[in-house]
Image (cartoon, helix red, strand yellow):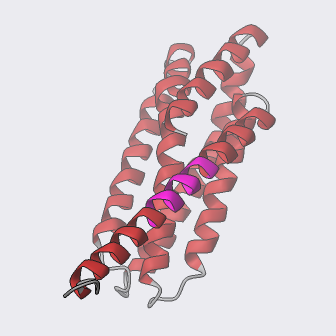
Amino acid sequence: MGTQEHPHRAGIGAVAGAAAVGLIAGLVADRGRRTLTQAAEGLAGDWVDVLKAEHLMVFELFDRLEATAANETGKRTRMLIKIRQAITKHAVQEENVVYPALARSDPSGEAAKLFAEHADVKTALYELEVLAKDDPQWMPKARALRRNIEEHARKEEDEVFPALRNRLSDEDSAKLTALMLKEGQRLA
């Protein structure tokens, strides 16, 4: 073949180059997500403000998901991944820091109910992940998940968080904020 490159090898080079570009783009996107998450947490204020801001972010992601058409399966997959990432980070902060503080200060069992609701959300996310993104039931299931998350967030924001905040001293609330942000940084 002399100086001419073998067509198969040229194809491998192009694929390797495209893979490298994709990897770099993914790393940059991940770094951007991490930077945005950290900046939002730093500006948000105390633990309640951070969690409320995260609720809003999840609903904005759902807005974008619900704007997709059934044939936009790639976009639906990407949006579902973003929703899962946001919910996972948020759930870890609540489950590892906020709910234990709630359980210590409120023996009514509300923390256990909230843990169970998180388990339901994780199950629904899994069901959406394994269902074909163009299945006629996919979007109704996604909307049902959103409604469940909205109800959960409303209960937290209107009842649970204010009650817990009232039971905590300013010092304990500041500690809770610091612990929660630290927990979130591990997943950002």
Magenta segment: 22-32
Q: Is residue 65 left or right of residue 166?
A: left
Quarter of the image where the C terminus is located = top right
Residue 121 visible here: yes
Quarter of the image where the N terminus is located = bottom left
Residue depicted at x 42% and y 62%: 20
Q: Nearer the viewer, residue 53 or 77?
A: 77
Give above or below for 102 relative to 145.
above
Residue depicted at x 37% and y 45%: 119
Q: Quadrant of residue 73?
A: bottom left
Residue 151 drawn in magenta:
no
Residue depicted at x 46% and y 55%: 84
Q: Position of residue 34 (x, y in %)?
A: 60, 44
Q: Nearer the viewer, residue 160 or 20?
A: 20
Residue 158 visible here: no
Residue 25 drawn in magenta:
yes
Q: Position of residue 160 (x, y in %)?
A: 63, 33
Q: Position of residue 111 (x, y in %)?
A: 48, 29
Q: Is residue 42 left or right of residue 80?
A: right
Give above or below for 125 relative to 77.
above
Q: Position of residue 45 (x, y in %)?
A: 79, 31
Dominant SS in magenta = helix
Q: Nearer the viewer, residue 185 or 26?
A: 26
Q: Is residue 137 left or right of residue 82?
A: left
